[in-house]
Every structure is written in structure tokens, then in C-alpha cells.
Amino acid sequence: MYISQDVDANQVNFLASEHFTSFTDKVDATSYAVQTDVLGHKVIPAGTVFPTNDAGAQGITLNEVDVSNGTQLVPIVREGWVFGLRLPVLPTTAAVTALTTIHFKDAADVAAAQPQG
């Protein structure tokens, strides 16, 4: 008999179109975006700006990935349309600028939500 904790999965659809291009890349537990879930797993959420949320941004993770046991492969959206306000962390202005082939359907709202200062 197995007894385990019930866990609810909640993943918001951040894709604004069914047409996108993704390529696989590697990610590990040293990523800035690692979070620990309720089961103690180290995960990087779907919709994370990859590899950094700044001028070095190259894409957005398509799926959540568990990096508890080392380096994992994850599909990275490199081209397409997304809803920036639905991402787990708001992309910075520098990241939006760096993601030249990713278009934000809600670009004006993303820009307005940026911290001032």
C-alpha cells in the first residue's frame, strides 16, 4: 500500500498561438528559476524565461522540468506568440528586447507592469 500526499497541478497556458518553434536545451539546479515544490522537488516552471531573465534571454521553457536529480532536457520556445502576463515571473524589459523572435500579445500590459525606477 502506498500513501502519499495529494498534489494539485496548475499550469497556466501562456501560449497565444498554436504555432511556435522550440528547441531542446539543458537546464540544471543552478538556474535562477529553480523552485522547490510541495514534495521537495527542485523544479523550473513552464513559462520561465531561459536561461536568464535579462538581456541574455534566449527563449521560454515550454514545460515544467524537475532538476532534483541533475541536468535535464527541456523544450525552449524560441519563436512564437505568448502572453507575458501569464508567465510565472514577469519578463524584464531587457528580456523582452532580447527575445526578438518571441512576440508578446500583451506587450503594452507587460511594459506597464514593469517596476519603475
Image: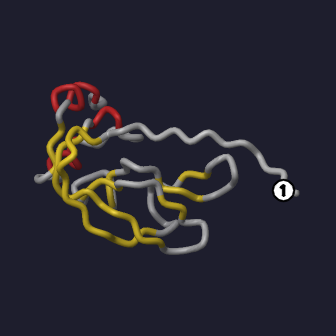
Q: Quadrant of residue 104?
A: top left
Q: Secondary structure at mark 1?
A: loop
Q: Quadrant of the N terminus?
A: bottom right
Q: Residue at x 30, y 61 (%)?
A: 76
Q: Quadrant of residue 88?
A: top left
Left or right: 35 in relation to 89: right
Q: Residue at x 54, y 62 (%)?
A: 66
Residue 44, compared with residue 85, is above or below; it is below
Q: Amino acid at mark 1?
A: Tyr
Left or right: 22 in relation to 32: left
Q: How is the image coloured?
A: secondary structure
Q: Residue at x 46, y 41 (%)?
A: 11
Q: Quadrant of residue 87?
A: top left
State the residue position of label 1.
2
Residue 105 x/y as whole percent: 17, 34
Q: Quadrant of the C terminus?
A: top left
Along the line of sight, the residue nearer the viewer: 90 or 62: 62
Residue 116 x/y as whole percent: 27, 28
